[in-house]
Amino acid sequence: MTVREAPPRITSFLVKVASRCNLDCDYCYVYHHADQSWRSMPKLLSVGDRSAFVERLSTYLAEESIKRCTVIFHGGEPLLAGVETLVAFAGQIRAATPSAVDIGLQTNGLLLTEAALEAFEASDISISLSLDGPKYANDKHRNSKRGRSSFERVQDSLVRLKSHPKIFAGVIAVVDPTTPAEDLLAFFASHAVPKLDFLLPDAHHVRQPAGRSEQPDLYEAWLCHAFDVWLDHYPQLSVRTFEALLDAVAGLPSTTDAFGLGDVSLIGIETDGSYHDLDVLKVTKDGATKIGGTVADTEISSIASSAHLAVHRQLLSRPGLSVTCQECAIVDICGGGSLPHRYGANGFDNPTVYCGEMTALVAHIKGRLEGLLEGGARPAETLPDAFRFDHYEAAELGAAEMTLLCEASRNVLTSELLEAASFLPPDEFQKVANLGETEPERLAELCQQPGAVAWQRTLASQNLGRLVHTVDGQPLSADPAYLDDLLGRSEGDMTSLAVASEDSWLRKPFGDAIYFETAAFATQARSVVEEALRIVETWRPALANEIRMACRAVQFVRDPLAHPEKIVSFSDNTVPGALYVSVWQGDRLIDPYDLADSLIHEHRHQKLYLLERISPTVEPTDMRVVSPWREDLRPPSGLLHAVFVFVELRRFWQFVLRNGPSRLHNRAVNQIRSTDEHLAEAFETLLSCPLTKTGRSLTEVLKKASKSALEAA
């Protein structure tokens, strides 16, 4: 079993407020699959259990320093509990904790009146609707116990929901491959639903998908065709299933538990107050979800550290997958598939029952994505023969190489902004054109602002009909008014390193996935950034100059899902030149040496991005390799990035060992030792990767630099 350092952090809570339903959908995992425990459950969650849950939740969020969580009212049909009860319950939850609590409701819509919607909007309770499409499609499965259609009443609720966009979260539809994809997508597009989630029917190796034995490619053909219909005709419709796969194929984190490896973050509470695992595991066997304990007698922290969830976590890790999945080329995309779909007579030691469908769909999406990228590709630039990789890698020697890369980036970004600005209203475009004619240097500097890059690329995409989303799947649109913010910046604002600025486009691409520190916290932390930069300047002035040359912004972030003592940092090529770092550990400011480490770390990523924009380091490949610094497999480019970063960080910790404070002596020794071990392993792996000439040249330089540092030590 994979050993994890700490119990999972539970940030989502599915609360069954009602165990009965006013529909009888024939595919429902609660009523028509293996687990029939609903029969012995109370019809409603009691007042006492609601209060006990609120107390347990408040205590847990405080213990784990969780700043944001989600509570979903579920069932059965949750509206059977009554609107007033749900509104009061939501208020009780929020009043008990200073943490932000997002509260939602999954409903079949039969009881969703205008009065209910007004009450939910006033209480900020979001609504997700279950609906399978137009009447003939919906009536195949979603009818009353007497076989009566539910469609008209649910469609009325859909129309009402559209007048409450603030709380309309989207629609969930279960796929029936006998319904043409054109009909489904046209129906949901006509209603402009904010998000659509296609679910494959719950099935596994004991209970196979309906209809597939007669037609083996039934679901495969439907999914590939549906993807094409969506991409070609309805890209404005946010279909989470397809968008999640597009992100996964592109190497981005998955936004759904149906794809990709991950960790447990959700538990359920049944109407008797008992704790349960992922609800849809009820399709596997009786009692599959029961963890033990109730809100009346057990803390959530005990559930998080339970043996039951430890087993579930293991199944979501690479070692927990079947051998077939571990050896599969698309394992980082599919992740073995949804856990319930992996179930068989031998437990979960199987690929998803939809393995063939996932393999075909991923290959299909890759083909479509490659076609789009090739169609819009810019002419490739090349490095001059005089480019010295050994100079580029070392800040003291690489001024000429960095100048070349920065100028190339500036030219491309200027061209991109002018192209994107052509989509603006004429008077707005004229502002950019005039600036280019009268102050070309100022325009070039404006184009290098990280927020400007994210904004103009979103603007260009949306005007080409391509839907853009935040990291956590929210629709993203470019407001032309941002241009005035850019044009109003002084030269000093644009050329200096902007620390914790309120630039909205440094933050928008990440949605709610990243927590940005408040202005009050940021003000307190600016001095630590200054101290960290002084440390870098004292150690290596050339590196400090290089950071100022390549980077324009530092943003303060916090991961609300991570342990409060964990130091996090990242950079992203969608906002080139921006460094995202944490500056607080619990209730204290970070050590300036740790912050210096983070700044150097993220700068090296940005430095390598500059090179890769001109000359790729890895040939196109689906290959995934072991990285000593990560649990999950990485593409070769990710491993090269890690090596590029840690060769530099090894130098930094050698400096700390020699010249830093005594409190960091042991830390420095351990950092250097582990880095040496990891680099040796990483270099051996890189040699087996399909590197380009640039990638091979850079790897050789890094290997020599690492060896020289080792000999000097």
Image: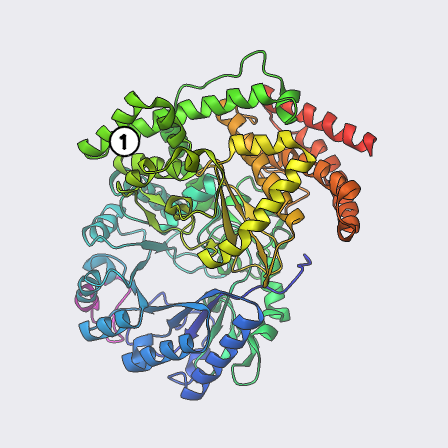
Give the image quarter of residue 477: top left
Can residue 111 be seen from the camera position used here?
Answer: no
Q: Could you tell me which residue is drawn at 50 percent across and 58 percent down?
A: 521
User: What residue is shown with label 1?
Assistant: 421
| Quadrant (top left/top right/bottom left/bottom right) for the N terminus | bottom right
Type of amino acid under label 1: Ala
Looking at the picture, does residue 322 appear above or below residue 372?
A: below
- Residue 51's spot in the image, x, y percent? 45, 84
- Rendered residue at 40%/29% (across/down): 445
On screen, residue 15 versus residue 712, left or right, reads: left
Q: Residues within 10 Å of mark 1 (few under 14, many from 20)?
A: many
Nearer-the-camera pick, 560 or 327: 560
Determine whether, in the image, residue 378 is placed left or right of residue 194: right
Q: Main secondary structure of the magenta part?
A: loop
Front one among 364 and 119: 119
Up-down: is 196 above or below 480? Answer: below
Q: Is residue 124 left or right of residue 359?
A: left
Q: Check residue 487 for magenta coloring.
A: no
Q: Residue 711's spot in the image, x, y percent?
A: 83, 30
Q: Quadrant of the C terminus?
A: top right
- Colouring of the image: rainbow
The range drawn in magenta is 139-155
Can residue 427 be seen from the camera position used here?
Answer: yes
Task: Indicate whether 489 appears above or below 295.
Answer: above
Corner quadrant of residue 683 = top right
**Residue depicted at x 79% and y 41%:** 658
Q: Position of residue 464 (x, y in %)?
A: 27, 34
Task: Label 1: state its secondary structure.
Answer: helix
